[in-house]
Amino acid sequence: MHYDYLLVGAGLFNAVICQHAIKAGKTCCVIDKRSHIAGNIYTEEIAGIQVHMYGAHIFHTSNQEVWEYINQFATFNNFINRVKANYNGKMYSLPFNMATFEALWGVKTPQEAEAIIEKQRAILQGRTPKNLEEQAIHLVGTDVYHTLIEGYTQKQWNRPCNQLPAFIIQRLPLRFTYNDNYFNDSYQGIPIGGYTKMIAKMLHGATILCNTDYFDFIQQTQDTFSKIIFTGKIDEFFHYRLGKLEYRSLHFETEILDIPDYQGNAVINYTSYDVPYTRIIEHKHFEFGTQPKTVISKEYPADYTDGKEAYYPINDDKNNALYIAYTKLKELYPNIIFGGRLGAYKYYDMDKIIASAFEVCKNEKLR
Ligand code: FAD
Ligand code: UDP
């Protein structure tokens, strides 16, 4: 059989492309080496609860085009991510806001909080921050840094904060109000019924083959494809001929508990270096669940080695240069488009993934 597109990876990026292609009358074959569709946003129902099997996923965006698009395939609830942090048994509010400063210093006004941060920032002696540690102290002072950032970040990245790029911490808002919404975006929510159902709708009309690795499949198939969209690892595609890109991995320990509520919140971060996991997710709270049981996942950071999942690209100078060298090799394959978080070697939130898939659709005249 001839297909217009072979879509390698059944994650969100290819789901957007597949949906556009099918609508435009094209034929698509979607393969994934995993046993299921939906990539990292895969959810599975356990004890009546949608469990986020590859880590908590909250959809948030300020891009109206993306929001209207994704709402065609799911109804989103009105979940707002309000993360709490446990440091040595005491609870704090995240992201950094007046409730955090009140818990740390007993302050009641933005002026008092700003004055304390200003004083603590003096340790930098006016230097422009050149790494994550300095950036964090510059933003929120030494107390917040030692309580809520240092241990968590060092666990997550397995490197001291003064050896990490400053931009990682810029993802977190800092507010001198009591607004504890983890995100600044205009739209936010969780798809009712889970992400897997949403992706299944987007892939409708395609041939879908799970447990199918591209590198074996392409040797064995008799089918032909006009174009290939590859959302696997770009260095693997080129058989690591220029070297390996580095990633951080994770592993999750998921338990079903015979109680209705374990922690009273969807996400609680553990910010001390001494606790081996970075956060505990209680999945039912993403959907305001009232089931008699609950499901929790402890999220442990892990080194990335062969066979593990590549979760976070390590975008330091060395890896970024290697990635650029790989992008030059793409020119040898004009009928292959590389995309998604692994193909682009970038930490992309879901809305950015959709927006980047729109670009491919436009270039392909599908949108
Ligand atoms: P993936 O979902 O990774 O899909 C790629 C697919 O390709 C995979 O299924 C893989 O098995 C398959 N594949 C790879 N190689 C091959 C091969 N050789 N042959 C066949 N198949 C192959 N974003 C948000 O907006 N909100 C959040 O709250 C959020 N939380 C996150 C939490 C964590 C822990 C992480 C790591 C990411 C989070 N993200 C979040 C980002 C989100 O996961 C991504 O934006 C999204 O999953 C990217 O989709 P994708 O299609 O590019 O990649
Ligand atoms: N971070 C932190 N303490 C927290 C949560 C986050 O120091 O309690 C830092 C950490 O460096 C992390 C970054 O902020 O890598 C971005 O956090 P986010 O929640 O966006 O994503 P994560 O990397 O934890 O998936």
Image (cartoon, rainbow, N blue to C red):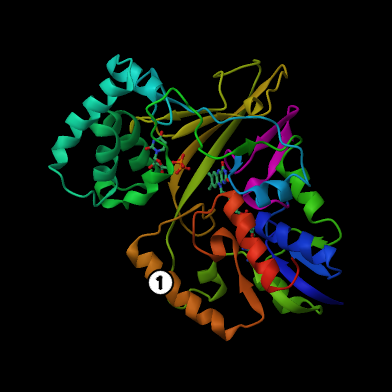
Question: Residue 104 magenta-drawn?
Answer: no
- Left or right: residue 331 versus residue 196 is left
- Left or right: residue 348 versus residue 52 is left
Does residue 308 lie above or below 333 as drawn?
above
> Which residue is the extreme one toward the bottom?
332
In the foreground, 211 or 352? 352
* Quarter of the figure with the C terminus: bottom right
Q: Which residue is mark 1?
A: 322
- Secondary structure, mark 1, is helix
x and y percentages locating residue 324 in the rendered image:
44, 73
In the foreground, 360 or 156? 360
> Which residue is the extreme one toward the front?
111
Q: Which residues are magenta?
A: 37-57
| x 62%, y 37%: residue | 188
Question: Residue 53 magenta-drawn?
Answer: yes
x and y percentages locating residue 220 in the rendered image:
75, 77
In the foreground, 151 or 330? 330
Q: Answer with the quarter of the image where residue 108 lies.
A: top left
| x 66%, y 17%: residue | 258
